[in-house]
Image (tube, rainbow, N blue to C red):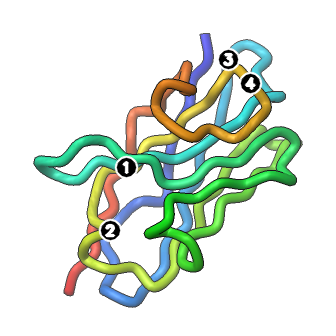
């Protein structure tokens, strides 16, 4: 079994930044695409960003382009999401995801493992 553990969420003012981390552990699961999704209160879970293996290919939701950056440290089996210029509309629970393929995740159907989520709250 693979465990994905997110960290780095919290409360930040509008215009601020946060960096989320997602560490994978369990059975060997290093060569896989990883990504981030988010779910705001009363809304469906939506795709944020993903990165393929070994990390040269990334994919973003249009509304996150230019503000969010996904990266990975393969030696640590960890994926990061740097979020800048945060807006109140970015408030959500952010979930780490892992696929069974090496190409970037583009939707929930590509995901085989989910993390428990980390809360991000952006105040106005």
Residue at the disc numbered 4: 101
- Distance Cα–Cα, label 1 vs label 4: 21 Å
Disc 3/disc 2 C-alpha distance (Å): 30 Å
Q: Circle 1 sits on which residue?
A: 38
Residue drawn at x 59%, y 43% is 35
Are the residues at dot 2 and dot 1 in contact (C-beta closer than 8 Å)?
yes
List the residue tagged with mark 2.
Answer: 90
Name the residue located 79 percent from the left edge and 31 percent from the top edge.
102
Q: Residue 97 location in percent, x, y?
A: 54, 35
The label shown at residue 26 is 3
Along the viewing direction, whichever of 72 and 43 lies nearer the viewer: 43
Q: Is residue 54 above or below residue 10?
A: above
Q: Which residue is located at x 59 percent, y 78 percent?
A: 66
3 vs 2, front mark = 2
In three-dimensional space, the C-alpha distance between marks 1 and 3, rounded to whole angstroms, equals 24 Å
**Side (left or right) of 111 relative to 42:** right
């Amino acid at each position: 079994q693979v465990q994905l553990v997110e960290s780095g969420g919290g409360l930040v003012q509008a215009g601020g930044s946060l960096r989320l981390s997602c560490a994978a552990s369990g059975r060997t699961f290093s060569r896989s695409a990883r990504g981030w999704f988010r779910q705001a209160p009363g809304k469906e879970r939506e795709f944020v960003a993903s990165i393929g293996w070994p990390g040269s290919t990334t994919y973003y939701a249009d509304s996150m382009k230019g503000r969010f950056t996904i990266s990975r440290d393969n030696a640590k089996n960890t994926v990061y999401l740097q979020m800048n210029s945060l807006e109140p509309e970015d408030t959500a629970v952010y979930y780490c995801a892992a696929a069974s393929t090496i190409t970037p995740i583009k939707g929930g159907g590509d995901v085989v493992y989910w993390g428990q989520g980390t809360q991000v709250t952006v105040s106005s």
